Image (spheres, rainbow, N blue to C red):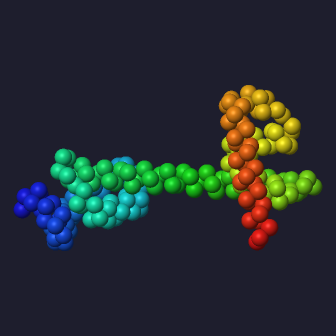
């Protein structure tokens, strides 16, 4: 059967046509993915997710490219999304570990680790840094702007929004 006819049947809900279409392109897809991921387990995960997305989105296939190119586009986007999530999760884990080490060090040196410090540790550095420089070390907005290489208005905004977030964190901690 002609691939275009098979695609049209799949778009009309023919499950056998869809299954045959996916089966026909599975080997091509996995060969591409193994080269892209360099990881057999991840290849299988991305391939399965790609198959599901193809089934869900078959009605969006418009025929402007080969079906295999459409599949590869979906697979590539899934892989990139996974890599981004993995990077964000790793950054979060690393940050959490660093905060725990900092808390432990401060307590070991008998320095105070207050609820405010705990809440501050959960802020992103973009907000934490100007708050520390302004309210803990006493620098002026203009000085902080130079240190961070951002406009003074941005410093004021980050401090304002950061303090709002701190208040929310502190209020949430008190309720728990």
Q: Quadrant of the C terminus?
A: bottom right
* Left or right position of 39 against 102: left
Q: Residue 23, position in %: x, y? A: 21, 64
The residue under the point 81% across, 54% down is: 117
Q: Does the image show residue 67?
A: yes
The residue under the point 47% across, 52% down is: 83
Q: Residue 155, position in %: x, y? A: 72, 36
Query: Which residue sits furthest left?
Result: 1
Q: Quadrant of the N terminus?
A: bottom left
Give the number of callouts.
Answer: 0
The residue under the point 70% across, 42% down is: 158
Q: Is residue 161 above or below residue 59?
A: above
The residue under the point 15% across, 60% down is: 7
Q: Nearer the viewer, residue 30 or 1?
A: 1
Q: Residue 140, position in %: x, y? A: 82, 32
Q: Is residue 149 above or below residue 33?
A: above
Q: Nearer the viewer, residue 6 or 39?
A: 6
* Left or right position of 104 against 109: left
Q: Residue 15, position in %: x, y? A: 19, 72
Q: Does the image show residue 103?
A: no
Q: Nearer the viewer, residue 37 or 123?
A: 123
Quarter where residue 24 is shown: bottom left
* Left or right position of 63 against 136: left
């Amino acid at each position: 059967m002609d691939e275009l006819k098979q695609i049209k049947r799949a778009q009309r809900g023919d499950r056998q046509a869809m299954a045959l279409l996916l089966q026909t392109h599975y080997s091509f897809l996995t060969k591409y993915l193994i080269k892209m991921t360099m990881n057999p387990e991840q290849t299988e995960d991305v391939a399965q997710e790609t198959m599901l997305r193809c089934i869900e989105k078959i009605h969006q296939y418009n025929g402007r490219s080969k079906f295999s190119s459409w599949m590869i586009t979906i697979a590539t986007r899934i892989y990139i999304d996974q890599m981004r999530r993995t990077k964000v999760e790793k950054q979060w884990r690393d940050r959490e570990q660093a905060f725990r080490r900092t808390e432990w060090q401060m307590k070991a040196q008998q320095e105070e680790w207050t609820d405010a410090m705990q809440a501050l540790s959960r802020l992103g550095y973009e907000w934490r840094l100007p708050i520390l420089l302004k309210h803990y070390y006493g620098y002026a907005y203009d000085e902080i702007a130079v240190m961070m290489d951002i406009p003074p208005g941005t410093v004021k905004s980050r401090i304002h929004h950061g303090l709002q977030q701190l208040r929310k964190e502190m209020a949430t901690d008190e309720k728990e």
